[in-house]
Amino acid sequence: NSWRLVASKPGAHTFHLLTRLYSGEVLLTGGTDNGDASTAAWLYNPYSESWTRLANMNHLHDSQTATLLYSGKVLVAGAGTSELYDPGTRGWTSQPAGAPGSDNTAVLLHTGQVFTASGSNATRYTPASP
């Protein structure tokens, strides 16, 4: 068992999320950058140990969730906004408002829906195609 340093994460993001994609790459989303919510997104390639800057998300996200869907897309949701990352196009598509509040948690259900909870609020997101 051991740890080792790899390519440094770009920027001073904190409170971001990491999501492993089916390709093995890792998507870094949102968080805060110098204390402000961020639209930043990066892709880490563990094979080449390199980072690639992606197009910004459409909404500011910190304390968000990022859930890998069966389709391979990633739903980023929180504070009343949501959007999908498509690894095929490396782009973002806004989704209906959802996941009220911040500090949400989320889980992918066997149906392909995403269940989120924050405080006394709970929501379900149903993708157009699971």
Image: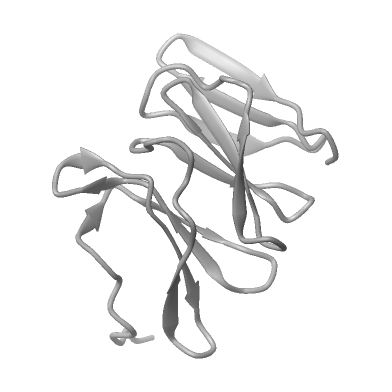
Q: Residue furthest top?
A: 120
Q: Residue furthest bottom?
A: 48
* Left/right of residue 52 with respect to residue 32 in the rendered view: right
Q: Residue at x 45, y 29 (%)?
A: 78
Residue 28 placement (x, y as % from top left): 43, 59
* Left/right of residue 86 with respect to residue 53 in the rendered view: right
26 up-or-down from 122: above or below? below
User: Number of numbered discs present?
Assistant: 0
Residue 53 placement (x, y as % from top left): 43, 68
Q: Quadrant of the C terminus?
A: top right
Q: Residue at x 55, y 31 (%)?
A: 82
* Left/right of residue 85 with respect to residue 88 in the rendered view: left
92 up-or-down from 53: above or below? above
Residue 126 placement (x, y as % from top left): 75, 27
Q: Residue at x 60, y 17 (%)?
A: 123
Residue 47 picture quarter: bottom right
64 up-or-down from 96: above or below? below
Residue 3 placement (x, y as % from top left): 32, 83
Q: Residue at x 28, y 70 (%)?
A: 10
The foreground one among 58 and 120 is 58
Q: Residue furthest left?
A: 34
115 up-or-down from 6: above or below? above
Q: Quadrant of the N terminus?
A: bottom left
Q: Please, which colouring scheme is shown? A: one colour
